[in-house]
Amino acid sequence: MEYLLSAILIAFSALFSGLTLGYFSLNTNTLARRAKLGNKEAMAILPIRQRGNLLLTTLLLGNVAVNTALSIYLGSIASGFVAGIIATAMIFVFGEIIPQAVISRYALWFGSRLAPLMKVIIFILFPITYPIAFLLDKLLGEEVSTLYSKHELMQIVSELEDSEHSDLDADEERIVHGALQFSHTTVREVMTPKERVVSFDEHQRVDKEFIDSISDHTYSRFPVYSGNPENIIGILYTKELISESSNAEIRDTEEAFSDNFIKVRPEEKLDVVLGRMLKRKLHMGIVMTKNKNFLGVITLEDIIEEIIQYEIKDENDID
């Protein structure tokens, strides 16, 4: 009978000790995220873990009470010194080291399966633990959530890609990294400078020779200027030239020329420009300074390439 009672007390000591480390190794944000994704283990633990101070006081009170009872009980069946040595050894090995080492590695599994028992224990000890937990809540405030910076998220993604236990591949890693970085990238860093931009005067006639010259450039859009190449007034859409009247000036074409275009600043961030392009359903922006000096162009393709960290090439691109 003495051995059975001692085993029961050690088991409860192990339970409280292991669950203390196990539950508090689980981040509430991570549990909430997994619960939203349908993880049943996270759904079972989350209601308990969210009330952190109440859970902590319950586990610590239970652990202290059980260890005290074990010491007193062993002292009643053995001499004080021997009881102290035995109690210390048993609590240290079977009540602390082993359960914490095991449960901390499988916290989600143990925590979810012991959640019903934990709710019962919380209910039983509630009159004692609630006032202490309430005081801690008022003094310390809510538990600080774990938030990751973009650089930390990128490192996490890289570690997942390197792990054999993750299904994240190198392409996904590259795209995630690009998506996390492109909002810090400016237009100036990815735009095509004006020295490399092919543009045409509004009075240029759309004849066969002109169409042949356009096909050599393999671009789908060209800036159109008036008089001075710095004075951009619109965009020429090459795919619409097929339906235009022969020998008409660019400005007189009905579909190929449009004065609806986006003006962007070189210091603007790519995520802002992307939002404007998507909202206005335009694929090209004209980069200008505050003084309306033409600097170059930026396209939707440029931004996408920055996100996926890969240059998009078609059959007409020249290496």
Image: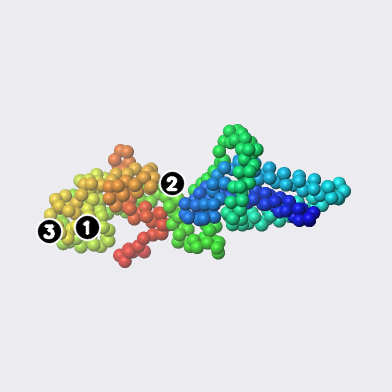
**Mark earlier in primary sequence (2, 1):** 2
Q: Image quadrant of residue 216?
A: bottom left
Tell me the mark number nearer the camera, choosing from 2 and 1.
2
Residue pointed to by mark 3:
246
Badge 1, how many Cα within 10 Å: few under 14, some, many 20+? some
149 with respect to 131 (left or right): left
Residue 268, x across and y down, in percent = 37, 43
Disc 2 marks a residue whose amino acid type is His
**Who's the residue at 45% across and 59% down the image?**
172
Q: Position of residue 189 (x, y in %)?
A: 40, 49
Left or right: where 136 falls relative to 275: right
Please give the label number shown on residue 184.
2
- Residue drawn 22% across and 55% down? 237
> Toward the viewer: 189 or 152?
152
Question: Label 2 crowding class (10 Å Cα cut-off): few <14, some 14-19, many 20+?
Answer: few
Contact between marks 3 and 1 (CB within 8 A): the answer is no
| Residue lying farthest to the bottom in this orientation | 315
Q: CA distance from mark 3 to mark 1?
A: 14 Å
Residue lying farthest front? 1
Label 2: state its secondary structure. Answer: helix
Asked if one can make out residue 206 in the rendered structure from this viewpoint, the answer is yes
Q: CA distance from mark 2 to mark 1?
A: 32 Å
**Is residue 194 something that shows in the picture?**
no
- Residue at 52%, 61% in the rendered image: 166
Name the secondary structure under disc 3: loop
Q: Which residue is mark 1?
A: 238
Closest to the observer, 196 or 28: 28
